[in-house]
Image: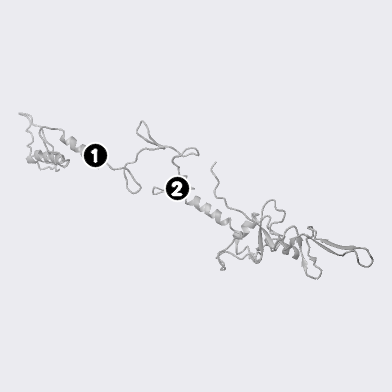
Amino acid sequence: MKYHPPAGSQDPDAKYVTGQPGKVRGSAVPAEAVEHPQREIVEVIRQAGLTPSGDDLTQLWQAIGQAITAAKPGLATTTAPGLVQIGDGLSITTQGLLSVLTATAAQAGIMRPDGTTCRVQDGVLSVPQQVNEYMEGWRTSWVGVPRPWRGTALPPDHCWANGDFVAFADWPELKAVYEAGGFAGMLMAWNADKDTKAANLGQWRPDDAEPTGLFTPNLTGQFLRCWGPGIERQAGSWQADAFQGHGHILYAGVDSGSSGGGGYMNFWQRNHDKAIKEPISLDGYGTARIADETRPANLALPVIIYLGQPAAN
């Protein structure tokens, strides 16, 4: 609605003057100043669906109330903005302030971003550093760990577990694991003799007293046995094939009645002692290793299981 100044005024924003008989002449009121406000009010009443009436002077108030109700937003959803109801963890104080509970170990609530492990950017909570640190720790935990693979093509940043030499200069993370004691219990001396090397095919070996790299375990062509605490064998040690100790008994004889009149029985027995670990002769039929079990040649390797994140205290 446009403002209509007193009639004859050159100032579009001129004020109206109240007349005083014999002193001040009152402002002349143009017709638009009376007509236009009435039409504005009547239009509001009609838009609200009411019929303008001279007997009801509350119609403008009613129309405004209906307009407010019609413009009231619905409840908020995940796809549309709207009103949010107060639920668990939220309350309204006597001063009309919205109170939000702070999260604790025993109470659900709102987390306060610390700017390091999580932060708010453009209204969005993100935890990139925490996730990256966790994934990086998981990745580095696999450095130097033999594992099965799905094909015969070597993937990037890997080597075969075949006894080859791996240089620290090429693989600094392998060096970091070595220097941190990550191969404890799975290392043989750098100057181990031939027999020690043959007996510990599953172990890593430095190339020198001040090593420049490591020789990998040689797991090719071997059966693997799981090693764990309480196993008497040394982790990474190689074990020859053997069969379980047992005995042989042979009976041979002739009944009485032969010349000489006296019966006799010849008896021969041979027991293979379980304590015998070295190959023994089979009387021209090769050699055999006798042990307390029957087994193929194998390597004893530690086996671990990932359990995930621990429960909260």
Q: Which residue is mark 2?
A: 119
Q: CA distance from mark 1 to mark 2?
A: 39 Å
The amino acid beneath tag 1 is Thr
Q: Is residue 74 left or right of residue 67?
A: right
Q: Position of residue 224 (x, y in %)?
A: 66, 61
Give the label on residue 170, or none.
none
Q: Residues within 10 Å of mark 2 (few under 14, many from 20)?
A: some
> In front: mark 1 or mark 2?
1
* Whether residue 156 is situated above or below residue 140 in the rendered picture: below
Q: Which residue is mark 1?
A: 69
Asked whether residue 243 appears in the rendered view, the answer is yes
Q: Position of residue 99 (x, y in %)?
A: 39, 36
Q: Position of residue 226 (x, y in %)?
A: 65, 56
* Whether residue 252 is situated above or below residue 2 in the rendered picture: below
Q: Is residue 122 left or right of residue 106?
A: left
Q: Are marks 1 and 2 in contact (CB under 8 Å)?
A: no
Residue lying at 34% horizontally and 33% vertically, measured from the top left: 96
Q: Earlier in the sequence, mark 1 or mark 2?
A: 1
The amino acid beneath tag 2 is Arg
* Whether residue 286 is situated above or below residue 86 in the rendered picture: below
Please tell me in which quadrant of the rendered image residue 264 appears: bottom right
Residue lying at 85% horizontally and 63% vertically, measured from the top left: 268
Residue at the extreme bottom of the image, as rendered: 284
Secondary structure under tag 2 reads strand
